[in-house]
Image: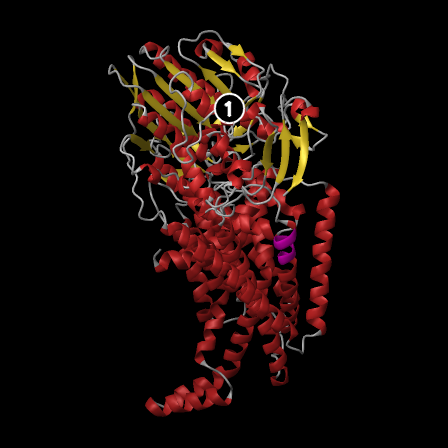
């Protein structure tokens, strides 16, 4: 960032965000550009009215002082020359406690207008909502009005009207003053005319409203007059210092909490997720940008309000700010802790909503705390108690922020030197030998299959030869617990991994990922793995552990298979930079305000990020606009969707006699995104009004529908790849296993809501479908299965008596029928936190025979 960028972010960006937030609230209530602009102008002017009110007082005081001193100054200038004149003036100024620099006070109002003008110009000039909007005779608010046409000459009327109002307002404001005091105001009116003459009429309309407001203010002031405020006496200096200490320490605490602690805590929890493999940059950049905005809000603009306030207002301001520190701390450290999982696009898994009584009680308790702190600050205003409290809090939040920043840099250091092959992979399959394919669809839900097949009967033909196992359970509700048994078998269930407590979870995860490729290559197969999850317990995809095995081809395709990754990364960054500050405000706000700030994940953004592709224009992220309509798409889903759609392009069919093993992971079902029915295609404007689903599962909320859509689209894309395999003669000699690591708690299937153990088993109901060699038909098996059966299924009839190369034990599924299967349900999914030698404590359950029979489930406790 350049110095100019830094200053712009500190001074102008907070105002732009304020303008956008106000306009968005108005737009959400009434979608009328005139009303929205009027609301924006009125709200901003009322907000800054105290600033201009105080500035007017200061300017009048400065002018009164100049007028009082002018006769003597003129006398000195008339009767003395050279150094003698200078010395006489300096002596007179000292005697009157005056400095010529005080004349700059008369320009305070103009100086205040500049940043507000720049912010308004940037916001309204680029506001896409104004495009094509006509109001009265103005045809397009995004263009100059051109209301007067004389022959071939077009004159913009609004800027002229704005200038006339500005001049009238200035004349009233400077009535009775010498002409030289009016020059600055007339000159500024002329400058604004030049700057705004060819600007969008929406912007000019806004600034005209500001001038009307200023005119009305000046008329009122001229009628009522402005009383001059007496200067504070020297006896109040100590109290003024105490108030300032209380104010500045409160402002610093808010700046650190909102600018540093909250964003650094979010990013440090999973720094890898904020890194693009196609453009590796330290995610600390997001913290820096957010801290600049926070500094501008709480240190710069809040200080302007403070120093332009009267002594009494400063005192109240100081006490309020101290109370606000307690208010936001309670909201952040207590009430906002359990808001659910949030994506790197700052969108929560579930839409934010609260019961009225919960929202009211939490808000009331925070207000009571703030009131107590306000009274305490007033009661002990002559002591240092508040100073000690604030200093302690500042040291605490600063220490936590530094710890988080160190953690981010440490995490980034492990990936900063990593190199990714940007070429798409080549996945080989043979016509003349056996191929084994294992496809993990992260978070694909097993219970969806009957619904999907009922809705799309044509998929039955593409999935001809598959056996669907609805009675399948996973060993956890997240990838860190659910993927090891999927890749490594029953020795990598959470209970078995915990029993091998001399080895780290990271090493056991790596073992599981290596197990099938190593066994297949040792038996003469060529092995390929794509996007293996949590290699070396890194959230950022990598294939480091395969470097020592030349017979295993390992690839990363996420982002790389996206032809628009560069543009999309830039747009995602712009969205993160903007929304992160609102996310921080969300975390320190009472729950009653969360829906307003969060705005369905849009954070009241009006200029959404737009990407132009060959297929159309897309905006990020996806925002539901009604029960059946959405705007935009989710960036991660776009990446993963491209991954699946390009499988045919990356598949190479050979005629050699070698067998091939292909193992891949797709996160497409993991990234909920609503698509356009009935074909489930990507669309920037989804409208599924009137579309009905033939199944029996619940489809009542965005998150339920979006998960179903993402699962459906993944199966559709795989079906196209299956057609490609048939066309190229590698279908019958290929075994395919489609499986997921876990499901999702969505309460969609009544048969899986287990009231007796308080569990929605949909969260541990993974997809499992198997196509064997030369198989036909689509079958459903009620056999009790787990996703730990995958290695045994893959080796079956291909490799006899496979042995785990790391433990020396035979790989089979015998244990499944010998004992109940123990499942770990843990909220600690983050491998940066849950990364010891054993899994952290969680809720344990056991199940046998049928997951749909509540009597087969038992809650074992939390340990």
To which residue does mark 1 refer? 813
Residue 655 locus on image (x, y percent): 24, 14
Q: What residue do we see at 60% from left, 55% from top? A: 46
Q: Is residue 385 above or below residue 370?
A: below
Q: Element at badge 1?
A: loop
Are there few (<14), some (14-19), or many (20+) residues within 10 Å of tag 1? some
Residue 268 visible to the viewer: yes
Residue 289 locus on image (x, y percent): 43, 54
How many numbered markers are drawn? 1
Is 69 displayed left or right of 531 in the figure? Answer: right
Q: Which residues are magenta?
A: 328-334
Q: Report the quarter where the C terminus lies.
A: top right
Residue 653 locus on image (x, y percent): 28, 17
Indicate yes or no whether the magenta region holds residue 329: yes
Indicate yes or no whether the magenta region holds residue 253: no
Q: What residue do we see at 31% from left, 27% from top? A: 522
């Amino acid at each position: 960032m350049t110095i100019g960028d830094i200053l712009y972010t500190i001074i102008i960006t907070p105002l732009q965000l304020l303008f956008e937030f106000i306009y968005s609230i108005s737009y959400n209530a009434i979608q009328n550009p005139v009303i929205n602009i009027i609301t924006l102008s009125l709200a901003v002017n009322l907000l800054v009215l105290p600033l201009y009110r105080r500035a007017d007082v200061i300017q009048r005081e400065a002018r009164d002082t100049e007028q009082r001193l002018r006769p003597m100054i003129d006398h000195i200038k008339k009767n003395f020359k050279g150094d003698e004149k200078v010395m006489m003036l300096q002596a007179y100024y000292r005697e009157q406690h005056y400095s010529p620099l005080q004349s700059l006070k008369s320009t305070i109002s103009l100086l205040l207008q500049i940043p507000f003008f720049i912010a308004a110009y940037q916001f309204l000039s680029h506001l896409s909502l104004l495009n094509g909007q006509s109001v009265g005779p103005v045809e397009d608010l995004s263009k100059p009005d051109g209301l007067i046409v004389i022959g071939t000459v077009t004159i913009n009327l609004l800027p002229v009207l704005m200038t006339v109002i500005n001049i009238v307002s200035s004349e009233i404001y400077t009535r009775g003053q010498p002409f030289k005091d009016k020059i600055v105001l007339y000159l500024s009116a002329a400058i604004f005319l030049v700057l705004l003459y060819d600007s969008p009429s929406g912007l000019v309309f806004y600034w005209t409203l500001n001038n009307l407001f200023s005119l009305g203010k000046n008329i009122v002031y001229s009628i009522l007059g402005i009383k001059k405020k007496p200067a504070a006496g020297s006896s109040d200096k100590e109290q003024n210092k105490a108030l300032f200490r209380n104010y500045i320490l409160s402002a610093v605490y808010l700046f650190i909490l909102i600018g540093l602690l909250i964003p650094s805590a979010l990013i440090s929890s999973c720094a890898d997720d904020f890194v693009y493999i196609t453009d590796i940059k330290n995610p600390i950049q997001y913290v820096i940008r957010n801290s600049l905005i926070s500094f501008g809000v709480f240190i710069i603009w809040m200080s302007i309000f403070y120093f332009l306030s009267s002594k009494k207002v400063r005192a109240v301001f100081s006490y309020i700010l101290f109370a606000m520190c307690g208010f936001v701390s309670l909201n952040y450290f207590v009430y906002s802790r359990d808001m659910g999982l949030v994506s790197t696009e700052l969108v929560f898994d579930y839409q934010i909503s609260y019961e009225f009584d919960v929202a009211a009680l939490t808000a009331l308790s925070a207000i009571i705390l703030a009131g107590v702190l306000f009274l305490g600050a007033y009661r002990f205003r002559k002591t240092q108690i508040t100073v000690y409290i604030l200093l302690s809090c500042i040291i605490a939040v600063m220490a936590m922020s530094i710890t988080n920043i160190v953690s981010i840099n440490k995490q980034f250091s492990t990936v900063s030197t990593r190199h990714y092959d940007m070429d798409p992979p080549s996945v080989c399959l043979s016509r003349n030998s056996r191929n084994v394919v294992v496809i993990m669809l992260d978070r694909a839900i097993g219970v969806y299959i009957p619904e999907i097949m009922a809705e799309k009967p044509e998929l039955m033909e593409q999935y001809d030869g598959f056996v669907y196992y609805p009675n399948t359970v996973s060993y956890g509700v997240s990838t860190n617990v659910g993927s090891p048994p999927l890749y490594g078998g029953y020795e990598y269930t959470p209970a078995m991994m915990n029993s091998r407590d001399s080895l780290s979870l990271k090493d056991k995860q790596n073992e599981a990922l290596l197990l099938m490729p190593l066994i297949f290559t040792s038996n003469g197969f060529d092995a390929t793995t794509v996007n293996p999850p949590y290699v070396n317990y890194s959230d950022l995809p990598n294939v480091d552990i395969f470097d020592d095995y030349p017979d295993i081809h390992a690839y990363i395709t996420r982002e790389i298979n996206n032809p628009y990754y560069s543009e999309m990364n830039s747009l995602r960054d712009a969205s993160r930079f903007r929304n992160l500050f609102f996310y921080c405000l969300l975390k320190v706000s009472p729950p009653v305000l969360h829906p307003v700030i969060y705005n369905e994940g849009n954070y009241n953004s009006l200029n959404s990020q737009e990407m132009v592709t060959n297929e159309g224009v897309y905006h990020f992220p996806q925002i539901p606009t009604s029960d059946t309509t959405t705007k935009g798409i989710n960036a991660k889903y776009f990446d993963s969707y491209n991954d699946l759609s390009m499988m045919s392009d990356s598949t190479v069919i050979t005629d050699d006699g070698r067998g091939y093993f292909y193992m891949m992971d797709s996160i497409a079902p993991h990234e909920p995104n609503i698509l356009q029915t009935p074909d489930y295609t990507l669309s920037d404007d989804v409208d599924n009004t009137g579309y009905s689903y033939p199944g029996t599962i619940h489809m009542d909320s965005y998150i339920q529908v979006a998960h179903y859509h993402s699962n459906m689209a993944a199966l559709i894309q795989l079906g196209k790849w299956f057609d490609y395999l048939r066309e190229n003669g590698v279908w019958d000699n290929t075994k395919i296993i489609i499986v997921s690591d876990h499901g999702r708690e969505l309460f969609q299937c009544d048969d899986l809501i287990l009231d007796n153990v308080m569990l929605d088993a949909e969260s541990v109901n993974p997809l499992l479908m198997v196509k064997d060699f030369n198989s036909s038909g689509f079958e459903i098996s009620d056999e009790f299965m787990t996703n730990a059966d995958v290695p045994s299924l893959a080796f079956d009839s291909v490799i006899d008596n496979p042995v785990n190369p790391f433990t020396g034990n035979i790989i089979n599924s015998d244990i499944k029928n010998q004992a109940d299967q123990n499942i770990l349900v843990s909220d600690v999914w983050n491998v940066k936190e849950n990364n010891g030698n054993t899994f952290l404590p969680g809720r344990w359950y056991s199940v046998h025979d049928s997951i749909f029979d509540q009597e087969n489930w038992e809650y074992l406790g939390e340990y």
